[in-house]
Amino acid sequence: MNINSTTRSKSSSSIFNPVTYNEFILDQTSKQDVEQYDYNDAKSIAEDYFSEPLHEPSYEPVYEKESFLELNTVGQSTGYAEGVIEESNTMSPKMRLGLYDLLQSFVTAVICAILILTFVGRTTEVIGHSMLPTLRYNDHVIISNLFYSPRNGDIIVFETESERFDEPLVKRVIAIGGQSFDINDVGEVLVDGIVIDEPYIDVTKTLRNGFVGPVDIPYGYVFVLGDNRNRTADSRDEDIGLLDTRYILGRVLFITLPGLDSNGNRDWSNFGFVE
């Protein structure tokens, strides 16, 4: 846009007055099409007209091109104000990156938890009193079957083929494949003909409960007993018998939430690893 030189006059102020400048521009563009100028264009035209160097504005223009007609009396523009509002409502790159990191951490944690519960360990609840005093009714425990092979003394969770038991059972492995099991006349448990030490039971005599021995344990099977020795169904019961290791769900590792005692209280001294 060319400015008519006949309309130029000196400003009475040595400092550029935005109001005077706006009035001048409005007058010069009233009969012409409005064109877009960047900041340098505006500064050059204004300095040429007023013959004074302009003081730098107190803001940085947001847009490279701004209309003279949009300038207000404080040297800002509608475009600039809209830019500030738009920028304030937009999430910064740093915030977006932080949100992405948080989401990534959450997804990773969920995947790890699923993998751990699937392949390393899972939780289950003890049903019944067959493992007293080691495990109580309603104890919540973690079990694992990862690279597991039964060993003497392990507490395991398993299923049976018998319709009599519709829930997984919890017992202790007493003898494994290749060993022999027997109960002598005074109620002592023998493995390979040797009386074993059983500090986890609170009775001095193990009843036969229909068991006839000795019995040799085939490989791939185990003989299990409950710690509540004479009030439990275990391998002495014909509905369970020798347990096929393929039915073992896992070894009990840890009590995460102790069950309630006879008074309805939780004994937190029972919290922790299981032996």
Image (spheres, rainbow, N blue to C red):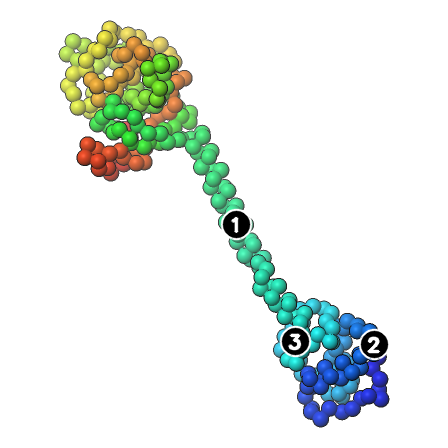
Res 2 → quadrant: bottom right
**What residue is disc 1 on?**
101
Res 22 → quadrant: bottom right
Badge 2 local density, few (<14 within 10 Å), some, or many (20+)?
few
* Sequence order check, earlier mark of 1 and 3: 3
- Image quadrant for the C terminus? top left
**What residue is disc 2 on?**
32
Badge 1 local density, few (<14 within 10 Å), some, or many (20+)?
few
Q: How far apart in space, not on screen, are marks 2 and 3 (Cα)?
A: 23 Å
Name the amino acid type tagged 3: Gln
* Sequence order check, earlier mark of 1 and 2: 2
Name the amino acid type tagged 2: Gln
Residue drawn at (35%, 25%) of the image? 251
Q: Which residue extends farthest bottom?
A: 12
Q: Which percent across, then down, holds residue 190? A: 22, 13
- Secondary structure under tag 1 reads helix
Residue drawn at (43%, 32%) of the image? 117
Q: Is residue 264 above or below residue 188?
A: below
Q: Is residue 42 above or below residue 176?
A: below
